[in-house]
Amino acid sequence: MICKPDAVERGLVGEIIGRLERRGLRLVRAELRQVDKETAGSHYGEHLGKPFYDSLIAHITRGPVLLMVVEGPEGTWQVVRTMMGATNPAAAAPGTVRGDLALSMTENLIHGSDSAESARREIGLFFP
C-alpha cells in the first residue's frame, strides 16, 4: 500500500494507518521515500500510453510517499481495496478512506494492490 504525496502533505498518514490497524491488519514494513521516475514508471507500467499516465507519474513523484507492507489473513489485498473505496472519491462510499478524506481522482491519497500477484510484484519493486 502507498500513502501518496497528498496523504503525506495533508497529514493523513496516521489516520490511514490507524484505520488499517483498527481493522486488525498489521503494518510489517514501512518507509517514507521519494519515488523516482524510473520506479514510478515500473509501478504504473500497465498504464503507459494512456492519457493519464504522465499525471500519475507526476503525482507519485512530487513528494515523499509512505510505502507499506500490510499483512493479515488470506485476501488482505481485498480488505485493503474495500477500505480504500472507489478510485473516484465522488463515487467512494462513506466510511472508506477515499470517501471520507480524498478530494479528487488525482488527489485520492492511497494506492493498494489489486491482486495477490500485484502485491508480490509491488513489494518486490519497492522493497527489493
Image (cartoon, helix red, strand yellow):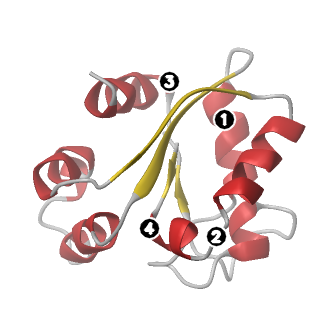
Mark before the other along the chain sequence, 3 or 1: 1
What's the CA distance linking mark 4 and mark 1?
23 Å
Q: Is residue 124 above or below residue 60?
A: above
Query: Which amino acid, by three-letter code, is at mark 1?
Result: Gln
The residue that appears at 31% across and 34% down in the rendered structure is 126
Q: Badge 4: few (under 14), some or many (20 or more) residues near its Cα, within 10 Å?
A: many
Q: Which residue is mark 1?
A: 78
Q: Nearer the viewer, mark 4 or mark 2?
A: 2
Query: Which amino acid, by three-letter code, is at mark 4?
Result: Pro
Identify the secondary structure beneath mark 1: helix
Say whether residue 95 is left or right of residue 124. Answer: right
Mark before the other along the chain sequence, 4 or 2: 4
Q: Which residue is mark 3?
A: 116
Identify the secondary structure beneath mark 3: helix
Give how far across and how far down residue 104 sits, in percent: 55, 84
Question: Which disc, if any, is residue 5?
Answer: 4
Mark before the other along the chain sequence, 3 or 2: 2
The residue that appears at 40% across and 22% down in the rendered structure is 120
Mark before the other along the chain sequence, 4 or 1: 4
What's the CA distance linking mark 1 and mark 2?
25 Å
Give how far across and how far down residue 73 sits, in percent: 74, 16
Q: Which residue is mark 2?
A: 11
Mark before the other along the chain sequence, 1 or 2: 2
